[in-house]
Amino acid sequence: IDLTGDDVAVEASDDPTCDPYAEVPCEHDEEGLEDDPTFVDPTLISPEDDGGGGAEVEATSRQLMDERRLTGNTNQIGTFAPLSCNPVEFDCTGAAGVSTVLGGESDPVVVPCGTCLVYDLGAEVTIGGLNIIGKLHVPTNYKSTLYTPYVFVQGELEMSDDQPISEDNTSMKIVLTGNSDVMFTPHEPVAGAAPLNAGEKPFLVAGGKLNIHGWDKVEGSGKTWTPILANAAADRLYPDTVVGESAPRIALPHLTDPSISCPNKVVHDFEDGVDFSVWKGGDGNVLAYNETSGTLTATNLRHHYQGFRLDFTKFVKDCPLTQDATYLVTIRLKIEDPTLEDGAVSICESQNHEDHCPKLGRRIIKAEGAGSLYDSKQYLLPSSIGKNNEWFTFSTTWTWNENELTDIVGQVLYLENFKAGQIIHMDEFQFELPSAKSYPPVDDPCNELVVNGNAENADGRGWNHYPMWTHRSASWVPTILEETVDGVANKYWHIGNRFWHGDSLRFHVNHQCFLQGATYELSLRARFTGETHASRYWFEIKGSTTVGYRYNKPLYCPAQSAADGWVTCSGVFVVDENYSFTSNPEIIFVTYDENDSTGYVDWDFDDVSIKFQSGPAGGLEIDGTDAARWGVNADVHITSSTLHGDDAQNGRVKAISMKENGNVVLELENPITPVISEEEAPGYGVEIAVTSRNIKIIGEDDGTYNGGYLQVFHSPGVAQVIEGVEFFNMGQSSRKNRFAIQLLYNGNVEGTSI
């Protein structure tokens, strides 16, 4: 007997010298029966014991019978055998249809003894029960779903299927329904087997025979499982990065339509002079143009409200701004303080407070009666301001909402809050919409997820931090710096003025790129400046997913100190359900070993990359002979490539293609995480099993833990064939002898195949 699975049970006596089928039961089997609430002595329900009690005794007898379920110890019951009223072999030629004995939905269907009936019912049928005393023959591949509270087989049930295995080819499906107990009465007497309470949803075989051939083991029928010979990786995704809700940022038509020239850039590099019609010093301040250096200089600063003024009115009238779009502002500056040595720390950095730092402001003047004048500002931060008399770049982003764009008569940008006596030099001013540099490539957005991770190709003439960003804009912003090593200039990202272990380079990636099962490589270079301690860090990808908010940590990097300089850290990760982001996730770097006691020092980052390596296992190559009956829309189970069973995967076949070598490639509806194949590791390839079957026996899902159960009960000598059958929602929780499939006290029956 070929028995597999934990839900197949065979019960026998524990005593090898005991014959459980003898007329006198084994003595040890009688022990404790009086304490078994499921056992009732048959003599207790004899009608002769009514003592004149009449209806009262009859009611007591019925109650005792109801309590006598087919659970607990049953070996006091005799054995069932093929019925004497049935022939050894049935001849179903010209047999009538079972529809001839069909009543209403609540009426049971009985196949009479000695009679063969052919199943001829419709696509979906509900009956009050099925008691097969004769033979019920279901034609090969007959399609029907039968809803019944029980199936009793005392004669023979025969059905078969030879179609490709597929959910589309489901033929006979029996659904066991209800949660009320049903009674079983043997057609011919059996010792100790008065009417028995079979419980709910039984498929009970008592003396009868199952002849179910859903998958015959014959030549050319293939196998139910086979090793995976090779993986066929799926390609990466190609979502639209610019247009629609899937765009990682506001969709701007200028990125895809070259004919759109407005909004345009405002670039003042002062190489060819200054337009003093828009540039002013304001309030007694003097602006001077240095033709030799091509710079604009503010001198004679006496008050904090003096500095640079740019009349923005004409620009926004000629080229209206786009509501809620992100605009980039990049300014190249040098602050010359005569009271400080060249290269000294600026007052802004030393005082570390906005009162001592320059600010960029925006003044919006609305039409009379249209509301108030709007005035907003952004401070240059200590983390990015340059040393005294040294050039540095200030970059920021700005947006305009609907109210800020309605009834506007004027706009002014101003740069002020300098210390009296300082001299301010401006080399360039640039205002622009982000260009294609700030977005993933439109034609291949999921190959490299990080935009400008090496800081070499930024907007703002190479110095604006966008699309990198900060969550602590009052303290720091990512800053692009440049150094020369061995004669080679290199730009990198600098994060200073940190107050928390999560203060780091931050950016978003397109959530649609995270295809489950895809493999990405993470890599970056980092430089730690702490002098008193080393620090580790991890790479974190976090955000809202379909399974809740997730803090994924796909890469842990070892401790490094300031003496190590630049240190490279890299690794790969496989996308799983924890990366099923519903919006664009946030990527940060979090340090281990920094706290308020150690302080939070500056970090530098470079060459940050999340690079596509390989797609998920979109196709699985297997032996074509083994897969002879595997069909499209069949469910499959792929075993684990690791030591953890939880890493096993399930899928459904979307398409099957034949290869010249005779193998087939299964394409799954949803790609899976790549697994070990025979091609990669001969002898260690994981297995794939087709779990669908065309013949199904199902317990109705009624919200309880009690499905159906199939039990071959006390039927020695009767071979059972149950091949190629799918059992679903079968078995009953915490009830003895309520397995999905069970052979109970049948002995060793040659020819039985499950």
Image (cartoon, grey):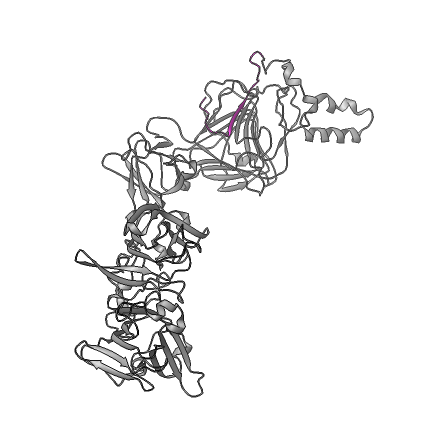
Q: In this view, does 362 lie above or below 688?
A: below
Provide residue 273's location: percent of width, then percent of height.
19, 81
The segment highlighted magenta reads 1-17
Between 526 and 249, the one lying in front of the other is 526
Relative to residue 331, is residue 157 drawn left or right?
right
Q: Specify whether 470 is left or right of 23.
A: left
Q: Does the magenta stretch include residue 75?
A: no
Q: Can residue 448 be seen in this view?
A: yes
| Residue drawn where x is 47% and y is 18% of the image | 750
Counting the numbered discs, the total is: 0
The quarter of the image holding the N terminus is top left
Q: Which of 737 and 617 is in front in this view?
A: 617
Percent coordinates x, y for residue 39 in the rendering: 67, 25
Q: Picture coordinates of residue 656 (x, y %)? A: 31, 41
Q: Is residue 256 visible?
A: no
On whether residue 14 falls in the magenta region, the answer is yes
Q: Is residue 473 above or below residue 205?
A: below
Seen in the image, is 479 located left or right of residue 69? Answer: left
Nearer to me, 722 or 354: 354
Question: Can you give x and y, in whole percent of width and height, for residue 45 in the image?
Answer: 73, 24
Residue placed at 41% from the left, 64% from the top? 472
> In this view of the protein, which residue sits in the foreground, 181 or 348?
348
